[in-house]
Amino acid sequence: MFTVLGDAVNVAARLQEMTKDLECQVVVSEEVYKVAGLPEDGPPVLEIVIRGHATPMVVRTVAEAERLATMMATATSLVAE
C-alpha cells in the first residue's frame, strides 16, 4: 500500500473536484499546460481559488479529454520534427 502526500497531490485532487463545478472533463494548471508545450490559443483560461492557497491559480478548462489528448499528440509530433 502507498500513501502520497504533499501540495501537488492536494492541488491535483482539488482541480479534479472542480471539473464538476466548471462542467468540463479536465482542469489543467497553466504551469503544466505550458510545460507540456501546448498552444497558447488553446482552452479557456480562468483564475480559480484553491482551498489552502492564498493566491488564485491560473488554469485551463478542457470540455472533452479527447481534445487535450489530440493537442498533446500534435505538440509532441511538432517537437519530434
Image: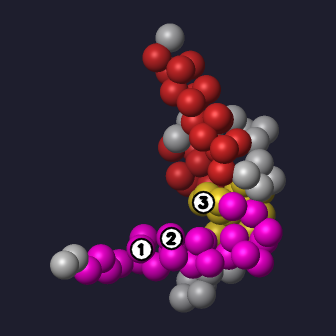
Q: Quadrant of the N terminus?
A: bottom left
The single residue placed furthest to the bottom in the displayed view is: 52
Question: Which image quadrant for residue 4?
Answer: bottom left
Q: Label 2 to label 3, Cα distance in Å? A: 9 Å
Instruction: Between label 2 and label 3, give the one nearer the viewer.
Output: 2
Determine whether the residue tagged by mark 2 lies in a helix, strand or loop: helix
Q: Earlier in the sequence, mark 1 or mark 3?
A: 1
- Check if residue 13 falls in the magenta segment: yes
Q: Name the residue under label 1.
A: 9
Q: Which mark is residue 12?
A: 2
**Residue 29: image x %, image y %?**
60, 60
Q: Position of residue 3 (x, y in %)?
A: 25, 80
Mark 3 secondary-structure assignment:
strand
x then y, percent, for residue 67: 70, 42
Query: Mark 2 belongs to which amino acid?
Result: Ala
Q: Seen in the image, is 32 located left or right of residue 20?
A: left
Query: Over which residues does the magenta segment extend?
Result: 3-25
Predominant secondary structure, magenta span:
helix
Q: Do the residues labelled 1 and 2 touch (CB within 8 Å)?
A: yes
- Categorize mark 1 by other alpha carbons within 10 Å: few (<14), some (14-19), many (20+): few
Q: Residues within 10 Å of mark 3 (few under 14, many from 20)?
A: many
Q: Which residue shows up at 56% across the image and 54% down it?
A: 31
- Whole-number angstrom distance, CA of label 1 to CA of label 3: 13 Å
Identify the image quadrant of residue 42.
Answer: top right
Residue corresponding to mark 3 = 29
Q: In the displayed orientation, state which residue is furthest to the left.
A: 1
Q: Do the residues labelled 1 and 3 touch (CB within 8 Å)?
A: no
In the rendered structure, which amino acid carries the disc numbered 1? Val
Vertical arrangement, residue 35 with respect to residue 18, above or below:
above
Please state which amino acid type lies under the numbered disc 3.
Answer: Ser
**54 left or right of 49 in image:** left
Residue 49 relative to residue 36: left or right = right
